[in-house]
Amino acid sequence: MSASARRQVVIIGAGPVGVTAALLLARHGVHSLLLERHRGIYPLPRAVVADDEICRILQSVGIHEEFAAVSRPAPGLRLLDPKRRLITEFPRSPHGHHGFAQTNMFDQPELERLLRGALARRPECELWSGVEAVSVTQPTDPTAPIRVTFRRDGSDEEEHLWADAVLGCDGATSLTRQAIGAAWEDLHFEESWRVIDVRTSRPVHSWEGAEQICCATRPATYMRIGEDRYRWEFRLDADEQLDGADGRERLRELVAPWVDLPADGPQDDDFQVIRQAQYTFRARLADRWRRGRIFLLGDAAHLTPPFVGQGLCSGLRDAYNLTWKLARVLRQGAHESLLDTYESERKPHARHLIRVAVAVGWAMTGGQDRGAAVRRAVVGTACRIPGVTAAVGRDLSPALSAGPLVRRRSRLAGRQLAGTICPQPWVRHEGEQVRLDDVLGDSFTVLTAVPPTARMTAVATALGTPPIHIDDLDDDGTLATWLAGGRSDAVLLRPDRVVMDTVPAGTGDFTGTAAWAPLLHTSRPAPDTRAVPPPRSTTP
């Protein structure tokens, strides 16, 4: 490998977030180099949950069908009291808003193998394994090349790379976070839990989803991951061990509500402990996510307790939000301030999910005071109110706040679609039944329920795509219902499928171009014009 060439993008860390970012950049024509200190894929399970929005992101990098073959849909989450009596249930649909099951269980090494396979098929992507980044240096000019210093495995010699942008996907102890001078904001949750991953042929007495045991003294989580794969999480005291003869007996006691094991404890032949690890679940948020063209993604930017299964999901959302913007700056001359919208959009969203996870943690399992029981009782009562459990599920991915790339309107204009994500039904295209995103591609889209006006066509043309009438897609009515519910004749979708702007019913025109056009390097249209000039292309 040669370190002499300047790179468009250097990505530090080749976990799921880093590899997904590289694949998304490749779809936009951006070349990247990933630096990974480990020689191979980390072989033990870590993340185990992906929601339907994440499956849609995996679709965008071309591995959704392979992922479906190694994952299994789960029906949801049940909250149980210490005697395993049902407090409430959060059901998850097998057919979510994004066209996939709302909850999917998987083994992280399997996902990483699929992502690495896709990476190997993309000539725009290069992976250097056994290479550790040791420093990232940002020049005074934010658009000047960034220096990345690294060492190869087994060598003390420092070498250098220069990049137009650097993505720090290097985890909770991120070197990149230190390089940009970011600090953690503590969101006030820290507990030590034991995570136990098991493969067993013994019958496991539970349903097919996840269970959360709500107990102030011994909270626990159970999840079925695969055909014979299970995960338990227990909050244990620091001196409690599960190794040795005494430890095996303690483990037998802990899993007894779910699986019958012999009196002398679990045996490897029918109850194999794949991994057990002590984790400190924390809630933290970096106070800044960017300096110039150096960015933080995933655990480098945010840490969340696992109670709502959104840790890895948040990191993949980071990649989906940032990559199209960075590609537009590097390849199409978009204004540098477009990159400001990454943190302004993703940080509040990540903070929200962390707070939801912390609330679940404290209300259901956290705290050993008398208030814990009261909190559990209140939550149990609230969740029996019609519609509350469905609302909690929807709230895991709330609409983005108003900003330059989200044109929110008065409530008088009807239900807000701006900032939400377009649904993905199956549609018929060129005689084949395909998912909507396979038709939309990787660019902006003007999706309309009425014959496109000259102005709609001009906006679409300026962004490099023709307008699409939903009648030409021949879906099951999902898109028409969605647009009608939002009282919109048309929507402008960003490459990440977020609604950027709407045409309210009967108005016939987008009115927010003045806000977003300068960011995308288009000229602001004059009030009486009927066309928007296309973006100016530049060579990186």
Image (spheres, grey):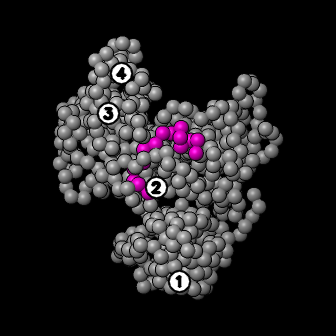
Does residue 188 appear in the picture of this structure? Answer: no
Q: Which mark is residue 524?
A: none
Q: Which mark's residue is nearer the viewer, 3 or 2?
A: 3
Q: CA distance from mark 3 to mark 1?
A: 58 Å
Residue contact between numbered discs 4 and 2, judged by CB atoms under 8 Å:
no
Q: Specify the segment rendered in magenta.
A: 100-114
Q: Which mark is residue 452?
A: 1
Q: Quadrant of the N terminus?
A: top right
For disc 2, the neighbor class at 10 Å (few under 14, some 14 to 19, many from 20) is many
Counting every numbered tag in the picture gives 4
Kind of residue indicated by mark 4: Pro
Answer left or right for 461 relative to 221.
Answer: right
Q: CA distance from mark 3 to mark 4?
A: 13 Å
Q: Quick one: label 4 or label 2, which is nearer the N terminus? A: 2
Q: Which mark's residue is nearer the viewer, 3 or 4?
A: 3
**Which residue lies at the image location 56% right of the left edge and 69% below the top edge?**
439
**Circle 3 sits on which residue?**
203
Find out whether residue 279 is within the magenta segment: no
Q: Quick one: label 1 or label 2, which is nearer the N terminus? A: 2
- Indicate the secondary structure of the residue bearing disc 4: loop
Q: Which mark is residue 53?
A: 2
Q: In the displayed structure, would residue 222 be above or below residue 433?
A: above
